[in-house]
Amino acid sequence: MIRSVRASLAIAQTSPLAEQLVVDCSKGNDDMGDMYWLADQDRETLADEHLETWLRGKVETHHPVCTARMASSAAEGVVDLT
C-alpha cells in the first residue's frame, strides 16, 4: 500500500499534473488531519512511518465483500433470480 501511495504522489507532483493541482511541499504541513496533508508532503523526505500512520487513519472500506448470502430467491438470500 505504501508503494502505491508513493507512486501516486510522484505522479501528482510531476508535470504537467502538478501544475493543475494545489500542491505546496514547502509549507511543512504537519497536521495529518488536514485533508491536503499528503499532497503537501515532499515525497523524497516523507518517512514510511508517517505515511503508514496517515493511511491507517484515513483508509476505510465502503464495499465489504462476502457479507450477503447469494441465493436463487429473495427468501434465501439477497438476490432474486426469478
Image (cartoon, rainbow, N blue to C red):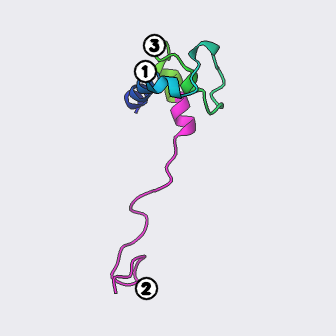
**Neighbours of disc 2 within 10 Å: few (<14), some (14-19), many (20+):** few
Q: Position of residue 26 (x, y in %)?
A: 60, 12
Q: Residues within 10 Å of mark 3 (few under 14, many from 20)?
A: few
> On the rendered image, what quadrant is the N terminus found in?
top left
Tell me where residue 50 appears, x and y as whole percent.
53, 22
Mark with earlier residue (2, 1): 1
Is residue 70 found inside the magenta-colored segment of the image? yes
Q: Secondary structure at mark 1?
A: loop
- Residue ID at (52%, 40%): 59
Q: Which residues are magenta?
A: 53-82
Q: Of helix, strand and loop, which one carries label 3?
A: loop
Q: Which residue is mark 2?
A: 75
| Residue located beneath label 3 in the image | 44
* Residue 65 drawn above or below residue 69: above
What residue sits right under mark 1 in the picture?
14
Q: Amino acid at mark 3?
A: Glu
